Image (spheres, coloured by chain):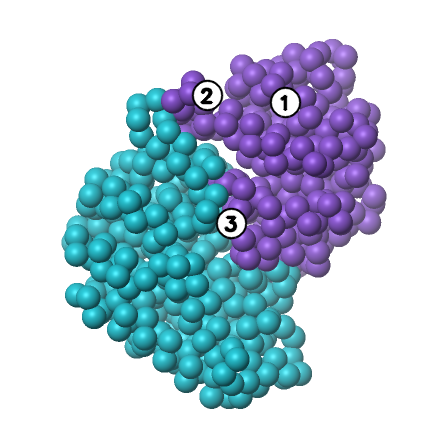
Chain colours: A cyan, B purple
Amino acid sequence: MIMDRLVREASESPVCVGLDTKPEYLPAAIAKMDRDEGDKLFLFNKKVIDATADLAACYKVQVACYEALGIEGMSAYARTLAYAREQGKLTIGDCKRGDIASTAEQYAKGHFEGDFEVDFLTVNAYMGYDAVSPYLPYVKDHDKGLFILTHTSNPSAKDLQEQKLEDGEQVFEKMADLVDEWGKDYIGEEGYSALGAVVGLTYPEAFADIQSRHPHTFFLVPGYGAQGGTGKDIADIFKRSRCAVINSSRGIICAHRGKTEGPDFVDYIRESAQTMKTDIMQWL
Amino acid sequence: MIMDRLVREASESPVCVGLDTKPEYLPAAIAKMDRDEGDKLFLFNKKVIDATADLAACYKVQVACYEALGIEGMSAYARTLAYAREQGKLTIGDCKRGDIASTAEQYAKGHFEGDFEVDFLTVNAYMGYDAVSPYLPYVKDHDKGLFILTHTSNPSAKDLQEQKLEDGEQVFEKMADLVDEWGKDYIGEEGYSALGAVVGLTYPEAFADIQSRHPHTFFLVPGYGAQGGTGKDIADIFKRSRCAVINSSRGIICAHRGKTEGPDFVDYIRESAQTMKTDIMQWL
């Protein structure tokens, strides 16, 4: 079961490398190549994957950065995923897709088969169970998993997610309850459901609340590094349970910026992934 | 201002043709062609646009159906949008994108410029204002618009959207309030904000509630036809104000199924769009 595999990878290193790659992040060694922007993004990502494969539990690829470049960007997205999977690494398509019924079936087909195939897809369930159920045949029969947005790491998460319901729960708590309920038939050997939750590191109390109420939920955690979350914040979570992979995007893939424009940029990237792993593991 | 243009188009005909095109919808005349699936989707869409251009306020293209076919599907998505725009028609990218800050900036770039350029994008604001603000420079300076998911047409919309908040509002009402507030600096000559809302036809009371409270919000309305909404339901809305375009996808683009597999399939499609227009306009 795919979540079992992620849980085991995460026990070695909880680092999820976020490939939110934009043209302005490329070192001159790649930026100056006579190729299209999509090719360059892919070449950069390939170098990042090669440099960090033994340090990363998985790679989260942010599709928005590739959609921004149109067809050539989407080609880079597809090639990045294929390359990571060829290296035996787990992939998360950070697509936050949210639609229902026959439309969500199309997203499931698009992201769990074919050019854009990933192991896990991030999903937005504002539309309720209809936005999740079309993925479940893939969870059941094709060893795929989901991460459903629950409490995100951004400041305006409060606009909706922290609204209080009449029963005293906040909206994000309701979402966490739903994720738990929807996933109860998909719990693996490691005790976690194939339907995980996205919960940011930037709201530690919300995290503790969800974690204590939902022991079968595994988390994809944004907010480390550039967004302000620290190794100590993660240690507080992991003292309770080792229930998460922690994403860093800019903190890793921009580590070379201002230091080198040359081909040795990968050394800085590897070092930053190693530092992040150490920053987390030192507390365990 | 783009919403002014849509309001005016909708006063002629409130029909939004939904290009949720899947390979199984193609008539044999196209399906049997020796071309890739993406080419065939585009050829079909082009015929649909040609057959309905004088009957449609706009075209809503459901990106999921194109993502499902990978790169060749995305190429069909891009060509469909370009063709509709070349014909002088307004386009809605039904992408329901929902991400924040620098990531949403990438979505804005991807869908308001370049290969995937549309006039309006559907957006999921579960993440709050941070999921909307990155599009606003395009709304302001590049004459673009948004439709934000508020109360969707699906049965499980109730899972989250109909949860009651402690102040007595439901979650979708809170979202409608936010859409109104976020859009207040973008109101055009016709009195509607460039930030519209997606509200389904299948919950008439929810619609009446939002419509009466938010006179500056223009609506993209799914749920007509295949999902159960009728011309009478729309008449009830339009008696109060002409505040919406009404989408039909399968009801139009599948009108030929079971009737013809030949090249005259477009006659059935045109007829269904005409029937829908008449079904709505007869009440006005």
Q: Are marks 2 and 1 on the same chain?
A: yes
Task: Residue B235: name its quadrant.
Answer: top right
Q: Is residue A244 above or below residue A180?
A: below
Q: Is residue A176 left or right of residue B98?
A: left
> How far across and how far down the image is residue B231, in percent?
66, 16
Mark closest to the chain's N terminus, 2 or 1: 2
Identify which residue, A52 or A183, lies in the foreground: A52
Which residue is depicted at the point 50% across and 70% down? A79
Q: Which residue is mark 2?
A: B169
Q: Is residue A212 above or below residue B190?
A: below
Give the structural element (helix, strand or loop) at label 3: loop
Q: Are marks 1 and 3 on the same chain?
A: yes
Of marks 2 and 3, the one in the foreground: 2
The residues bearing labels 2 and 1 have C-alpha atoms spaced at a distance of 14 Å
Give the structural element (helix, strand or loop) at label 1: loop
Badge 2: chain ID? B
Q: Is residue B211 visible?
A: yes
Identify which residue, A76 or A176, lies in the foreground: A176
Mark closest to the chain's N terminus, 1 or 3: 3
Q: Which residue is mark 3?
A: B99
Give the structural element (helix, strand or loop) at label 2: loop
Q: Which residue is mark 1?
A: B214
User: What amino acid type should be assigned to the residue bearing mark 1?
Assistant: His
Question: Seen from this angle, which residue lies furthest bottom?
Answer: A263
Q: Which mark is residue B261?
A: none
Badge 1: chain ID? B
Identify which residue, B246 or A199, lies in the foreground: A199
